[in-house]
Image (spheres, rainbow, N blue to C red):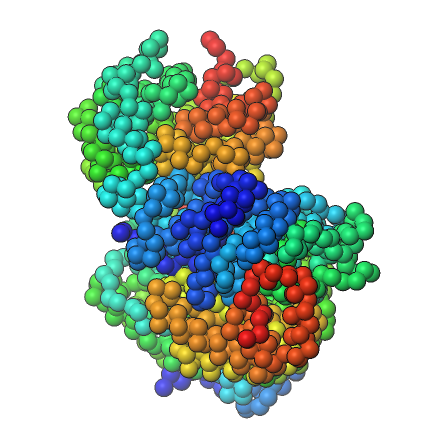
Amino acid sequence: MQYEEILHRCFRCGYCKLPGNYVDFNCPPYQAFRFETYSPGGRMWLLRAWLDNKIELTDRLQEIIFSCVNCGNCMAHCTFPKFKDQLLPAFTAAKAELVNAGRVPPVIRDCLTRLYQSGNAYGRSPKKREQWTRGIEIERFGNQDYLFFVGDVGAFDTRGQEIARSVVRCLKANGISFGLLGAAEISDGNEAGAMGETELFRHLAEKNIQTFNALGVRQIITLSPHGFHVIKNEYPRLGGNYQVFHYSQILAPVLQKTAFRTDLPPVRVTYHDSCYLGRHNLEYGSARKMLSAVPGLELVEMERNFQNALCCGGGGGNVFTGIIGSGLDTAARARVREALASGAQVLAVACPQCAVMLADAVKVENLDGRLEVRELSEIVNSRFEAK
Amino acid sequence: MYALKYDPQICAQCETCDCLMHCQYMDFELAEAKAEREKILTGQASKVLNDCVTCYACEEYCPADNHPFYQIVERQEEQGVLPVPTPITKQQLRMMQAQGTITPAAVNAPVINMCFFPMLTGCVRGPLYENASVIVGSDIFCNIMWLHFGKNSVIRERLPRMIDNIWNFYLKDSGVDELVCFHDECYGTYTRLAPAFGMKVPFRPVHLFEYLSARLDQLKNQIKPIGAKVAYQRPCSNRLVPETQHWVDDIFQKIGVERVERRYDRENALCCGQVFRAQQRDELADDIQQRNLDDMQQAGAAYCVFNCPACLFTLADAVAERGIFPILMSDLCQSALK
Amino acid sequence: MKELYRELATIVGPEYVSDQAEERYIYSMDPGTMPPAAPDLVVMPNSTEEVRRIMQAANRHRIPVVPLGAGLVLSGLSRALHGGIILDMKRMNRILEINEMSRYALVEAGASQGMLQAHLKKHHPGLKHSAPDAPPVATIAGNVSIHGSGHISHAHGFHSDMLNGLEVVLPTGEVVRIGSCATSDYWFARAPLPDLAGLFLGWAGTTGIITKLAIKLYPNHRFNDVGVFVSEDPELVPDILHRMTGTQMAEDITAWMTPKPDWARGFLHCNINYGANTKDELIWKRNLIRASVKDYIDRKIAGFMPLPSAMKAPFLDVPGRILTRFADVRKGGGFEYVGAIMPVELFPTAYHRGLEIAEQAAVSYSLGARVIGINHCMMFFYAYAFNRADDADVRRAQQALEETNRAVVDMGGIPWKAELPAQKEILRKMDPNMVALMTRIRAVLDPNGIMNPGNWEVD
């Protein structure tokens, strides 16, 4: 198994379970299940034991391996500099071993099947990928400055579609020149890769790259940080070299010049750092800059922010598979409680997957009316002076 | 081998004894200074050997370039009067030892010598250092710091090898014969210290500020004047090469900063104090650091500009606490470029 | 066992009990060298009431119970030597009360060092607790119950000295309050009542389960600094420590010696950490500390390292990460240490013996000593790193540890949180009446012998 040479070097010291300021546990599967086996250190030792034939590959071990949501907290906070950066690659490599052996939890198998058969994680017809655009005028990509890459959640999830429409509105209002692929778009492959299906990832990525290159795409704006991450970091080795931006990076510099209403009541907002913008790509500023540009917003920080942010728990395909469940201690529920404790009325997100996970958590926690999850452009649009 | 080029006759005949009379840390009447000088000349115990803080300044004060400071260090070593406790000295000797890991590498001019400060190689970036090569590592460490430890013997032992390494592993085969020294210590080593010990230096050392000044001329159209008041922390090693001081003002003028008039500047500059701490003289270090920083603050400096990494590491926090921005000269120049 | 499983699932909820192979594997060992001893069940309670019911069930079934915090004891004390239940206490991690005026914190037994530290930093920045150098997930209860020590131990003793009171569940299921909390709403002291806390400190979990504890808090100074005093002769160290501790200016004094990096080899470093409310006070303390060792400085045989702020940072870190990182020295994720509680005058003997053992056993080592109290004693640690993927390397470390334990007991010290072989050494040397008393007490508290059996038992 790739990276297996680091497995035994884990000391199970537990720094990986915590954020840098130690305020609470910060590893979503460990938080959800609380057995040491679900912590990064436990997973490392179990993988070593499995490879050494000391334990068997049971359903539970499969679940433990796939419970990793790829948030990267362990990599950020492991105290061993010589191999900390290989922790997540090792866990993903372990998932790949299980995928290759055909030994994956059913929910993972079903999700991968949908991705393979339909080119999206929802199993919906590719022809329906453009449905979210009904009623709004958006051009197909031709020779605009940017391709706007929507991703599966933006295209097929109801909430995701709302966000996609809102972001597009905001881009247009700020004069950004962009076009869509429409039904030619296929899943960016990030979740496939995160679930260890490296061949499926390659298949999806290569298809997208072919489409992009045929159209002469040079610059891409993504809706989702997941798409941002994978197109920026993984597509180049497959021949896909583009300048890639998350929409917040495009909007942040231009919003300063935007006219906003000043008659609306002030709102206290806290921003949830999405893992694929934040920890994985060190982009902590653009979303905050967007929010700071809007008068009447008081930005408050949660205790776990920037590199210490608590993942919403949606990564590693979990938003589609629900493998870590929705118990009291799950990440999304803990996160919305933390947002409420910060004094915020609005929990701002830059990722449609985070939006889905956190909005569900607000409901389960009975916080409707006290905390609202809103995506960045929705906040901006709601405060924009309509001409 | 590598005898110090020191002429006792010059000292014996010197009427002014500037080295001791101008010392910022020891107070002498002329008669007393001459008496202590006599003791040093004749190899007797002298309080100068105990009380010298090793700030290098007397190298500048001596009108005859007779290396009074290096001679003090010779005597310290001969008489076992160590400025720094033995265990600390031994540790430092080990820490800064050449690792023997140097391998030949092609370089091209300008070659920037980072000595043994790998943490600062990030300074060499952008148009200011276009096409520059960087050399760094324990095997090219200049070793001048042993002057602070009463260890001329270590300089004699280690420095020739460093000079050879720079020449044979990097410069010679690349056809480069100039070396831009990022740090005054290195420039002082190769222009003053090495020759004082009779060591030949086959390359031409270039002071960083000479390089920066020329480069700023070339990038003239890209300079946006900074428009701030700055204090300059003159490092002790610049005392070996006082003729380079004008580069500081040249650069400041080109990047549009005003050097504040303050007491502890130029010939009156104060040591950063880290060496005093090694000598276990904490209260003296506290005192001079306080005076130095008070001086900068009262003069209204917005930046404290450093050349020496050791001064920077020592004073950066204290400077910042005063609301003054600590910055290396190189980075200040970077910030002036659009 | 199936019957017990069902009962436990009813008590804590089915998602918090496991008899699965994965849990039994992971919970069978800690990151030290002791061989695995797997439990039958792992249970994670969330309240004292749940613990009470678990103990009653365990007693009924006569199944062993082993309490577990973060599992970082490294000497294998939380293995299930006779199978049974491992009680993972970490769900019970609430911080219940911070009393600013009386400077104490009341926490559940699973509360971690890191979370208390973070909580105080945010809500009570003028207070701190004495944290060990264990990783921040380590539990406060686990460390107190083994007589741990840490960053304020020079000033205020063992962490068990800083204990104000306990809530424990006895092996037979009774919930008992010990200390002032037994008669008052305040957890301010163990005096003046008969001090029953001693029944649960240093017993390796063989007398009951701690469910709550109150620990003393101390002023958190705005300004903090560290000096590192270096000498070459271990014979000087007891006097150096005696002098420095005599100033009573510092919070933590720890000596360390390590062969790597190379510049550190052969040098004795004494780290002295101190804090103050103003900069002037800090400098004044520094000067007093320096004055105490002036004689050595004047003779140039020792001195303080000149450290710029960036180099001081690792020595000011609480907990210090340097110790945890020792585990990767052999690229093998393992280290274990003998912590020998002994008088400071034994320092040179302890040091020389450590060097001998390490060199003979060809292990990677690090030696050090944290002063407890005003030179009242020290925790001299002999840390040996090993590569857990290399059986021979693990064995070498084990042999070094065993030899060290024997050497420590022979020279008049006592291994702290003693692993099983070390327990035997200690018991062999112990006053037989003390052994008898310990046995009697255990029999009274734990008539069915279910509490972490296999530990502290005479052969």
Q: Residue C148 appears at what percent x and percent y?
A: 62, 64
Nearest to the observer: residue B228 or residue A379: A379
Residue C338 appears in the picture as rendered: yes
Nearest to the observer: residue A14 or residue C313: A14
Nearest to the observer: residue A4 or residue B332: A4
Classify the position of the C terminus of chain C by image quarter. bottom right
Residue depicted at 28% across the width and 23% down the height: A123
Nearest to the observer: residue B66 or residue C327: C327
Q: Is residue A141 above or below residue C169?
A: above
Q: Residue C422 appears at what percent x and percent y?
A: 54, 74
Q: Is residue A314 above or below residue C320?
A: above
Residue depicted at 54% across the width and 88% down the height: B79
Residue depicted at 59% across the width and 23% down the height: A370
Residue B127 appears in the picture as rendered: no
In the displayed structure image, the side of residue A234 where residue B15 appears, left or right = right
Q: Residue C241 appears at what percent x and percent y?
A: 65, 75
Q: Residue C123 appears at what percent x and percent y?
A: 67, 43
Corner quadrant of residue A207: top left
Residue depicted at 33% across the width and 20% down the height: A155
